[in-house]
């Protein structure tokens, strides 16, 4: 019996995950997006559910899929939609892992008709989206809150800055320095940084292994 409990240490725990890019509409046929594949977030959902967690996976448009009786997938398109769905599920979450590549800006005005080509240049005015992760840090009660940081320079300093300013318990620094890390590939080079200043550097590994390592660290930090 003890063995079974050890294998499913997150049984009964609610884990909220965001994944993928967001698409911000310009008009009915065009959007601003990014190259996030959603793979990292889906691997985390897999790893968490394999430990017995009840997972809510809120994902922007991706080609990933997951079928697991403990995983509920909620598809969204825009940052605003993702914000709303995340907040619906945050209060009951024990662990929240925000791996989505959320657009930082969106078109200020969305045309309801397809925009016709006209002049030789065309300008779209953008406005900031809501920072979903930061908003969760501000209302955090008992949740263990995890963010990602995608950096190309001053990596450590920037990641630790985000850990603090967003009131996180743990941040996963995603290094784009290395080839074979980041968008569209199935490997990642990450560093885990906790709010108690534990820094764990990892080798380049598969996103599936990064997800497993992350879940093990979360188990340790939450004494689950
Ligand atoms: N994030 C979010 N909502 C946003 C922007 C980011 O929830 N509107 C989350 C991401 O999911 C990630 C973390 O915040 O977990 C950091 O995202 P990142 O893009 O690295 O940092 P930003 O705070 O957006 O700052 P910048 O892009 O300027 O580096
Ligand atoms: Ca950003």
Image: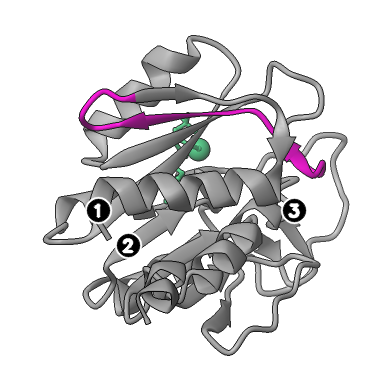
Check if residue 185 falls in the magenta segment: yes
Q: What's the mark number on residue 222?
A: 1
Magenta segment? 182-198
Image coordinates for residue 55, horizontal then vertical, percent: 47, 76
Q: Secondary structure at mark 1?
A: helix
The residue carrying mark 3 is: 37
The residue wearing badge 2 is 95
Q: Is residue 16 visible?
A: yes
Query: Residue 87 is drawn in which quadrant?
Result: bottom left
Which quadrant holds the N terminus? bottom left
Query: Split into 4 quadrants, where in the image is the C terminus?
Result: bottom left
Q: Is residue 218 above or below residue 109?
A: above
Rounded to the nearest whole Å, what is the CA distance between mark 1 and mark 2? 9 Å
Residue 214 placement (x, y as % from top left): 48, 46
In-front residue for pair 4/103: 4
Q: Nearer the viewer, mark 3 or mark 1?
A: 1
Q: What residue is drawn where x is 80% and y is 67%?
A: 63
Outermost left residue: 141
CA separation in Å, label 3 and label 1 = 29 Å
């Amino acid at each position: 019996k003890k063995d079974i409990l050890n294998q499913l240490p997150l049984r009964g725990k609610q884990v909220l995950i965001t994944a993928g890019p967001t698409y911000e509409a310009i008009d009915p046929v065009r959007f601003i997006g990014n190259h996030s594949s959603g793979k990292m977030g889906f691997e985390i959902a897999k790893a968490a559910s394999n430990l017995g967690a009840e997972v809510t996976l809120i994902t922007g448009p991706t080609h990933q899929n997951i079928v697991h009786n403990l995983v509920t997938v909620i598809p969204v398109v825009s940052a605003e939609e993702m914000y709303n769905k995340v907040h619906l599920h945050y209060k009951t979450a024990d662990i929240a892992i925000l791996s989505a590549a959320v657009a930082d800006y969106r078109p200020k005005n969305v045309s309801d008709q397809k925009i016709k080509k006209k002049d030789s240049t065309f300008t779209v005015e953008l406005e900031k989206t809501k920072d979903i992760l930061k908003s969760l840090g501000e209302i955090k009660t008992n949740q263990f809150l995890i963010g990602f940081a995608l950096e190309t320079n001053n990596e450590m300093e920037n990641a630790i800055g985000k850990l603090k300013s967003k009131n996180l318990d743990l941040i996963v620094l995603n290094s784009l320095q290395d080839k074979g890390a980041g968008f569209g590939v199935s490997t990642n080079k990450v560093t885990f940084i906790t709010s108690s200043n534990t820094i764990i550097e990892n080798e380049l590994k598969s996103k599936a292994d990064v997800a497993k390592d992350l879940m093990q660290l979360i188990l340790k930090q939450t004494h689950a």
